[in-house]
């Protein structure tokens, strides 16, 4: 039975690794109900969780989950001691704490960008998680930790990505980086919609030439229009050549 449960967990983890980019160390959000169930069933969370998930884990919680255990009294004092040993992640309810179930769901957002696992026994949280794609759920049943199978929302999301109806998170990041390399999209530090600077253009060199000055008192002759039938005349000068190659003018003839 234990080997079968381990194989199922390995298959589920591979699903989240391949389709939602989960990587080690796995970050696990834990609430007071999970710690109370572990204490009741004598489960060592820090020792058994890495073995079950077959990888390094980081156990964490929120301030709201700790505050909720304070208000519930001495019955959950042991669960509070366990939960205090985990890392406390900042939540948006620092000044005005909310119930742990509401806080955990708010930490996930719409797409679970930090790739959290959620360990809880709260029915409200489990119902909300099944509506979100890409959120692994851990709970305790029959003295063992169980990783729930992928929810219907996760399966539908993966199917939509494979059919081309949606773009996966990894594809969105690669598209964004390619746009930044090509200069199509602004980088993280630049503002969106910022216009590019134009290159400095040099004036036309022909427009920089000085105009020729006209001489005073000398009118410009009007341009003659060439008639279509008129042909241009060429003047030819005949030169007489002597034996020595000198030009001699013809002698004048006197009349008697």
Image (cartoon, rainbow, N blue to C red):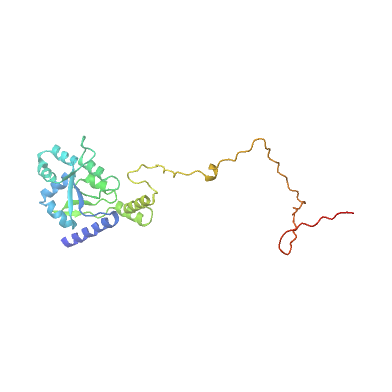
Q: Looking at the rendering, which quadrant does residue 125 occupy?
A: top left
Residue 142 visible within the image: no
x 17%, y 62%: residue: 3
Closest to the observer, 44 or 234? 234
x 37%, y 51%: residue: 179
Query: Quarter holding the C terminus?
Result: bottom right
Q: Position of residue 84 (x, y in %)?
A: 13, 43
Q: Is residue 199 left or right of residue 207?
A: left
Q: Is residue 35 left or right of residue 241?
A: left
Residue lying farthest right?
256
Residue lying farthest bottom?
243
Closest to the observer, 252 or 85? 252
Residue 173 visible within the image: yes
Closest to the observer, 255 or 81? 255
Query: Quarter holding the N terminus?
Result: bottom left
Q: Position of residue 122 (x, y in %)?
A: 20, 45
Q: Is residue 241 left or right of residue 213?
A: right
Tell me: residue 192, above or below residue 143: above
Q: Position of residue 47 (x, y in %)?
A: 12, 54
x 26%, y 56%: residue: 17
Closest to the observer, 176 or 119? 176
Residue lying farthest front?
256
């Amino acid at each position: 039975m234990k080997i079968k449960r381990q194989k199922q967990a390995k298959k589920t983890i591979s699903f989240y690794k391949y389709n939602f980019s989960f990587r080690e160390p796995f970050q696990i959000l834990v609430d007071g109900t999970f710690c109370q169930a572990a204490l009741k069933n004598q489960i060592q969370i820090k020792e058994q969780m890495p073995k079950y998930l077959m990888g390094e884990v980081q156990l964490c919680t929120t301030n709201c989950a700790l505050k909720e255990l304070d208000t519930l009294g001495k019955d959950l004092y042991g669960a509070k001691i366990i939960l205090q040993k985990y890392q406390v992640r900042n939540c948006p309810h620092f000044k005005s704490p909310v119930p742990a179930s509401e806080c955990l769901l708010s930490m996930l957002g719409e797409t679970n960008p930090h790739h959290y696992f959620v360990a809880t026994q709260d029915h409200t949280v489990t119902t909300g998680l099944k509506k979100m794609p890409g959120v692994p759920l851990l709970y305790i049943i029959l003295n063992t930790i169980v990783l729930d199978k992928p929810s219907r929302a996760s399966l539908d999301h993966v199917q939509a990505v494979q059919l081309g109806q949606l773009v996966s998170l990894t594809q969105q990041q690669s598209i964004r980086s390619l746009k930044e390399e090509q200069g199509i999209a602004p980088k993280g530090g630049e503002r969106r919609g910022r216009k590019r600077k134009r290159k400095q253009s040099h004036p036309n060199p022909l427009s920089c030439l000085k105009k020729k000055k006209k001489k005073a008192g000398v009118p410009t002759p009007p341009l003659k229009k060439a008639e279509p039938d008129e042909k241009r005349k060429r003047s030819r000068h005949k030169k007489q050549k002597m034996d020595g190659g000198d030009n001699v003018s013809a002698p004048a003839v006197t009349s008697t």
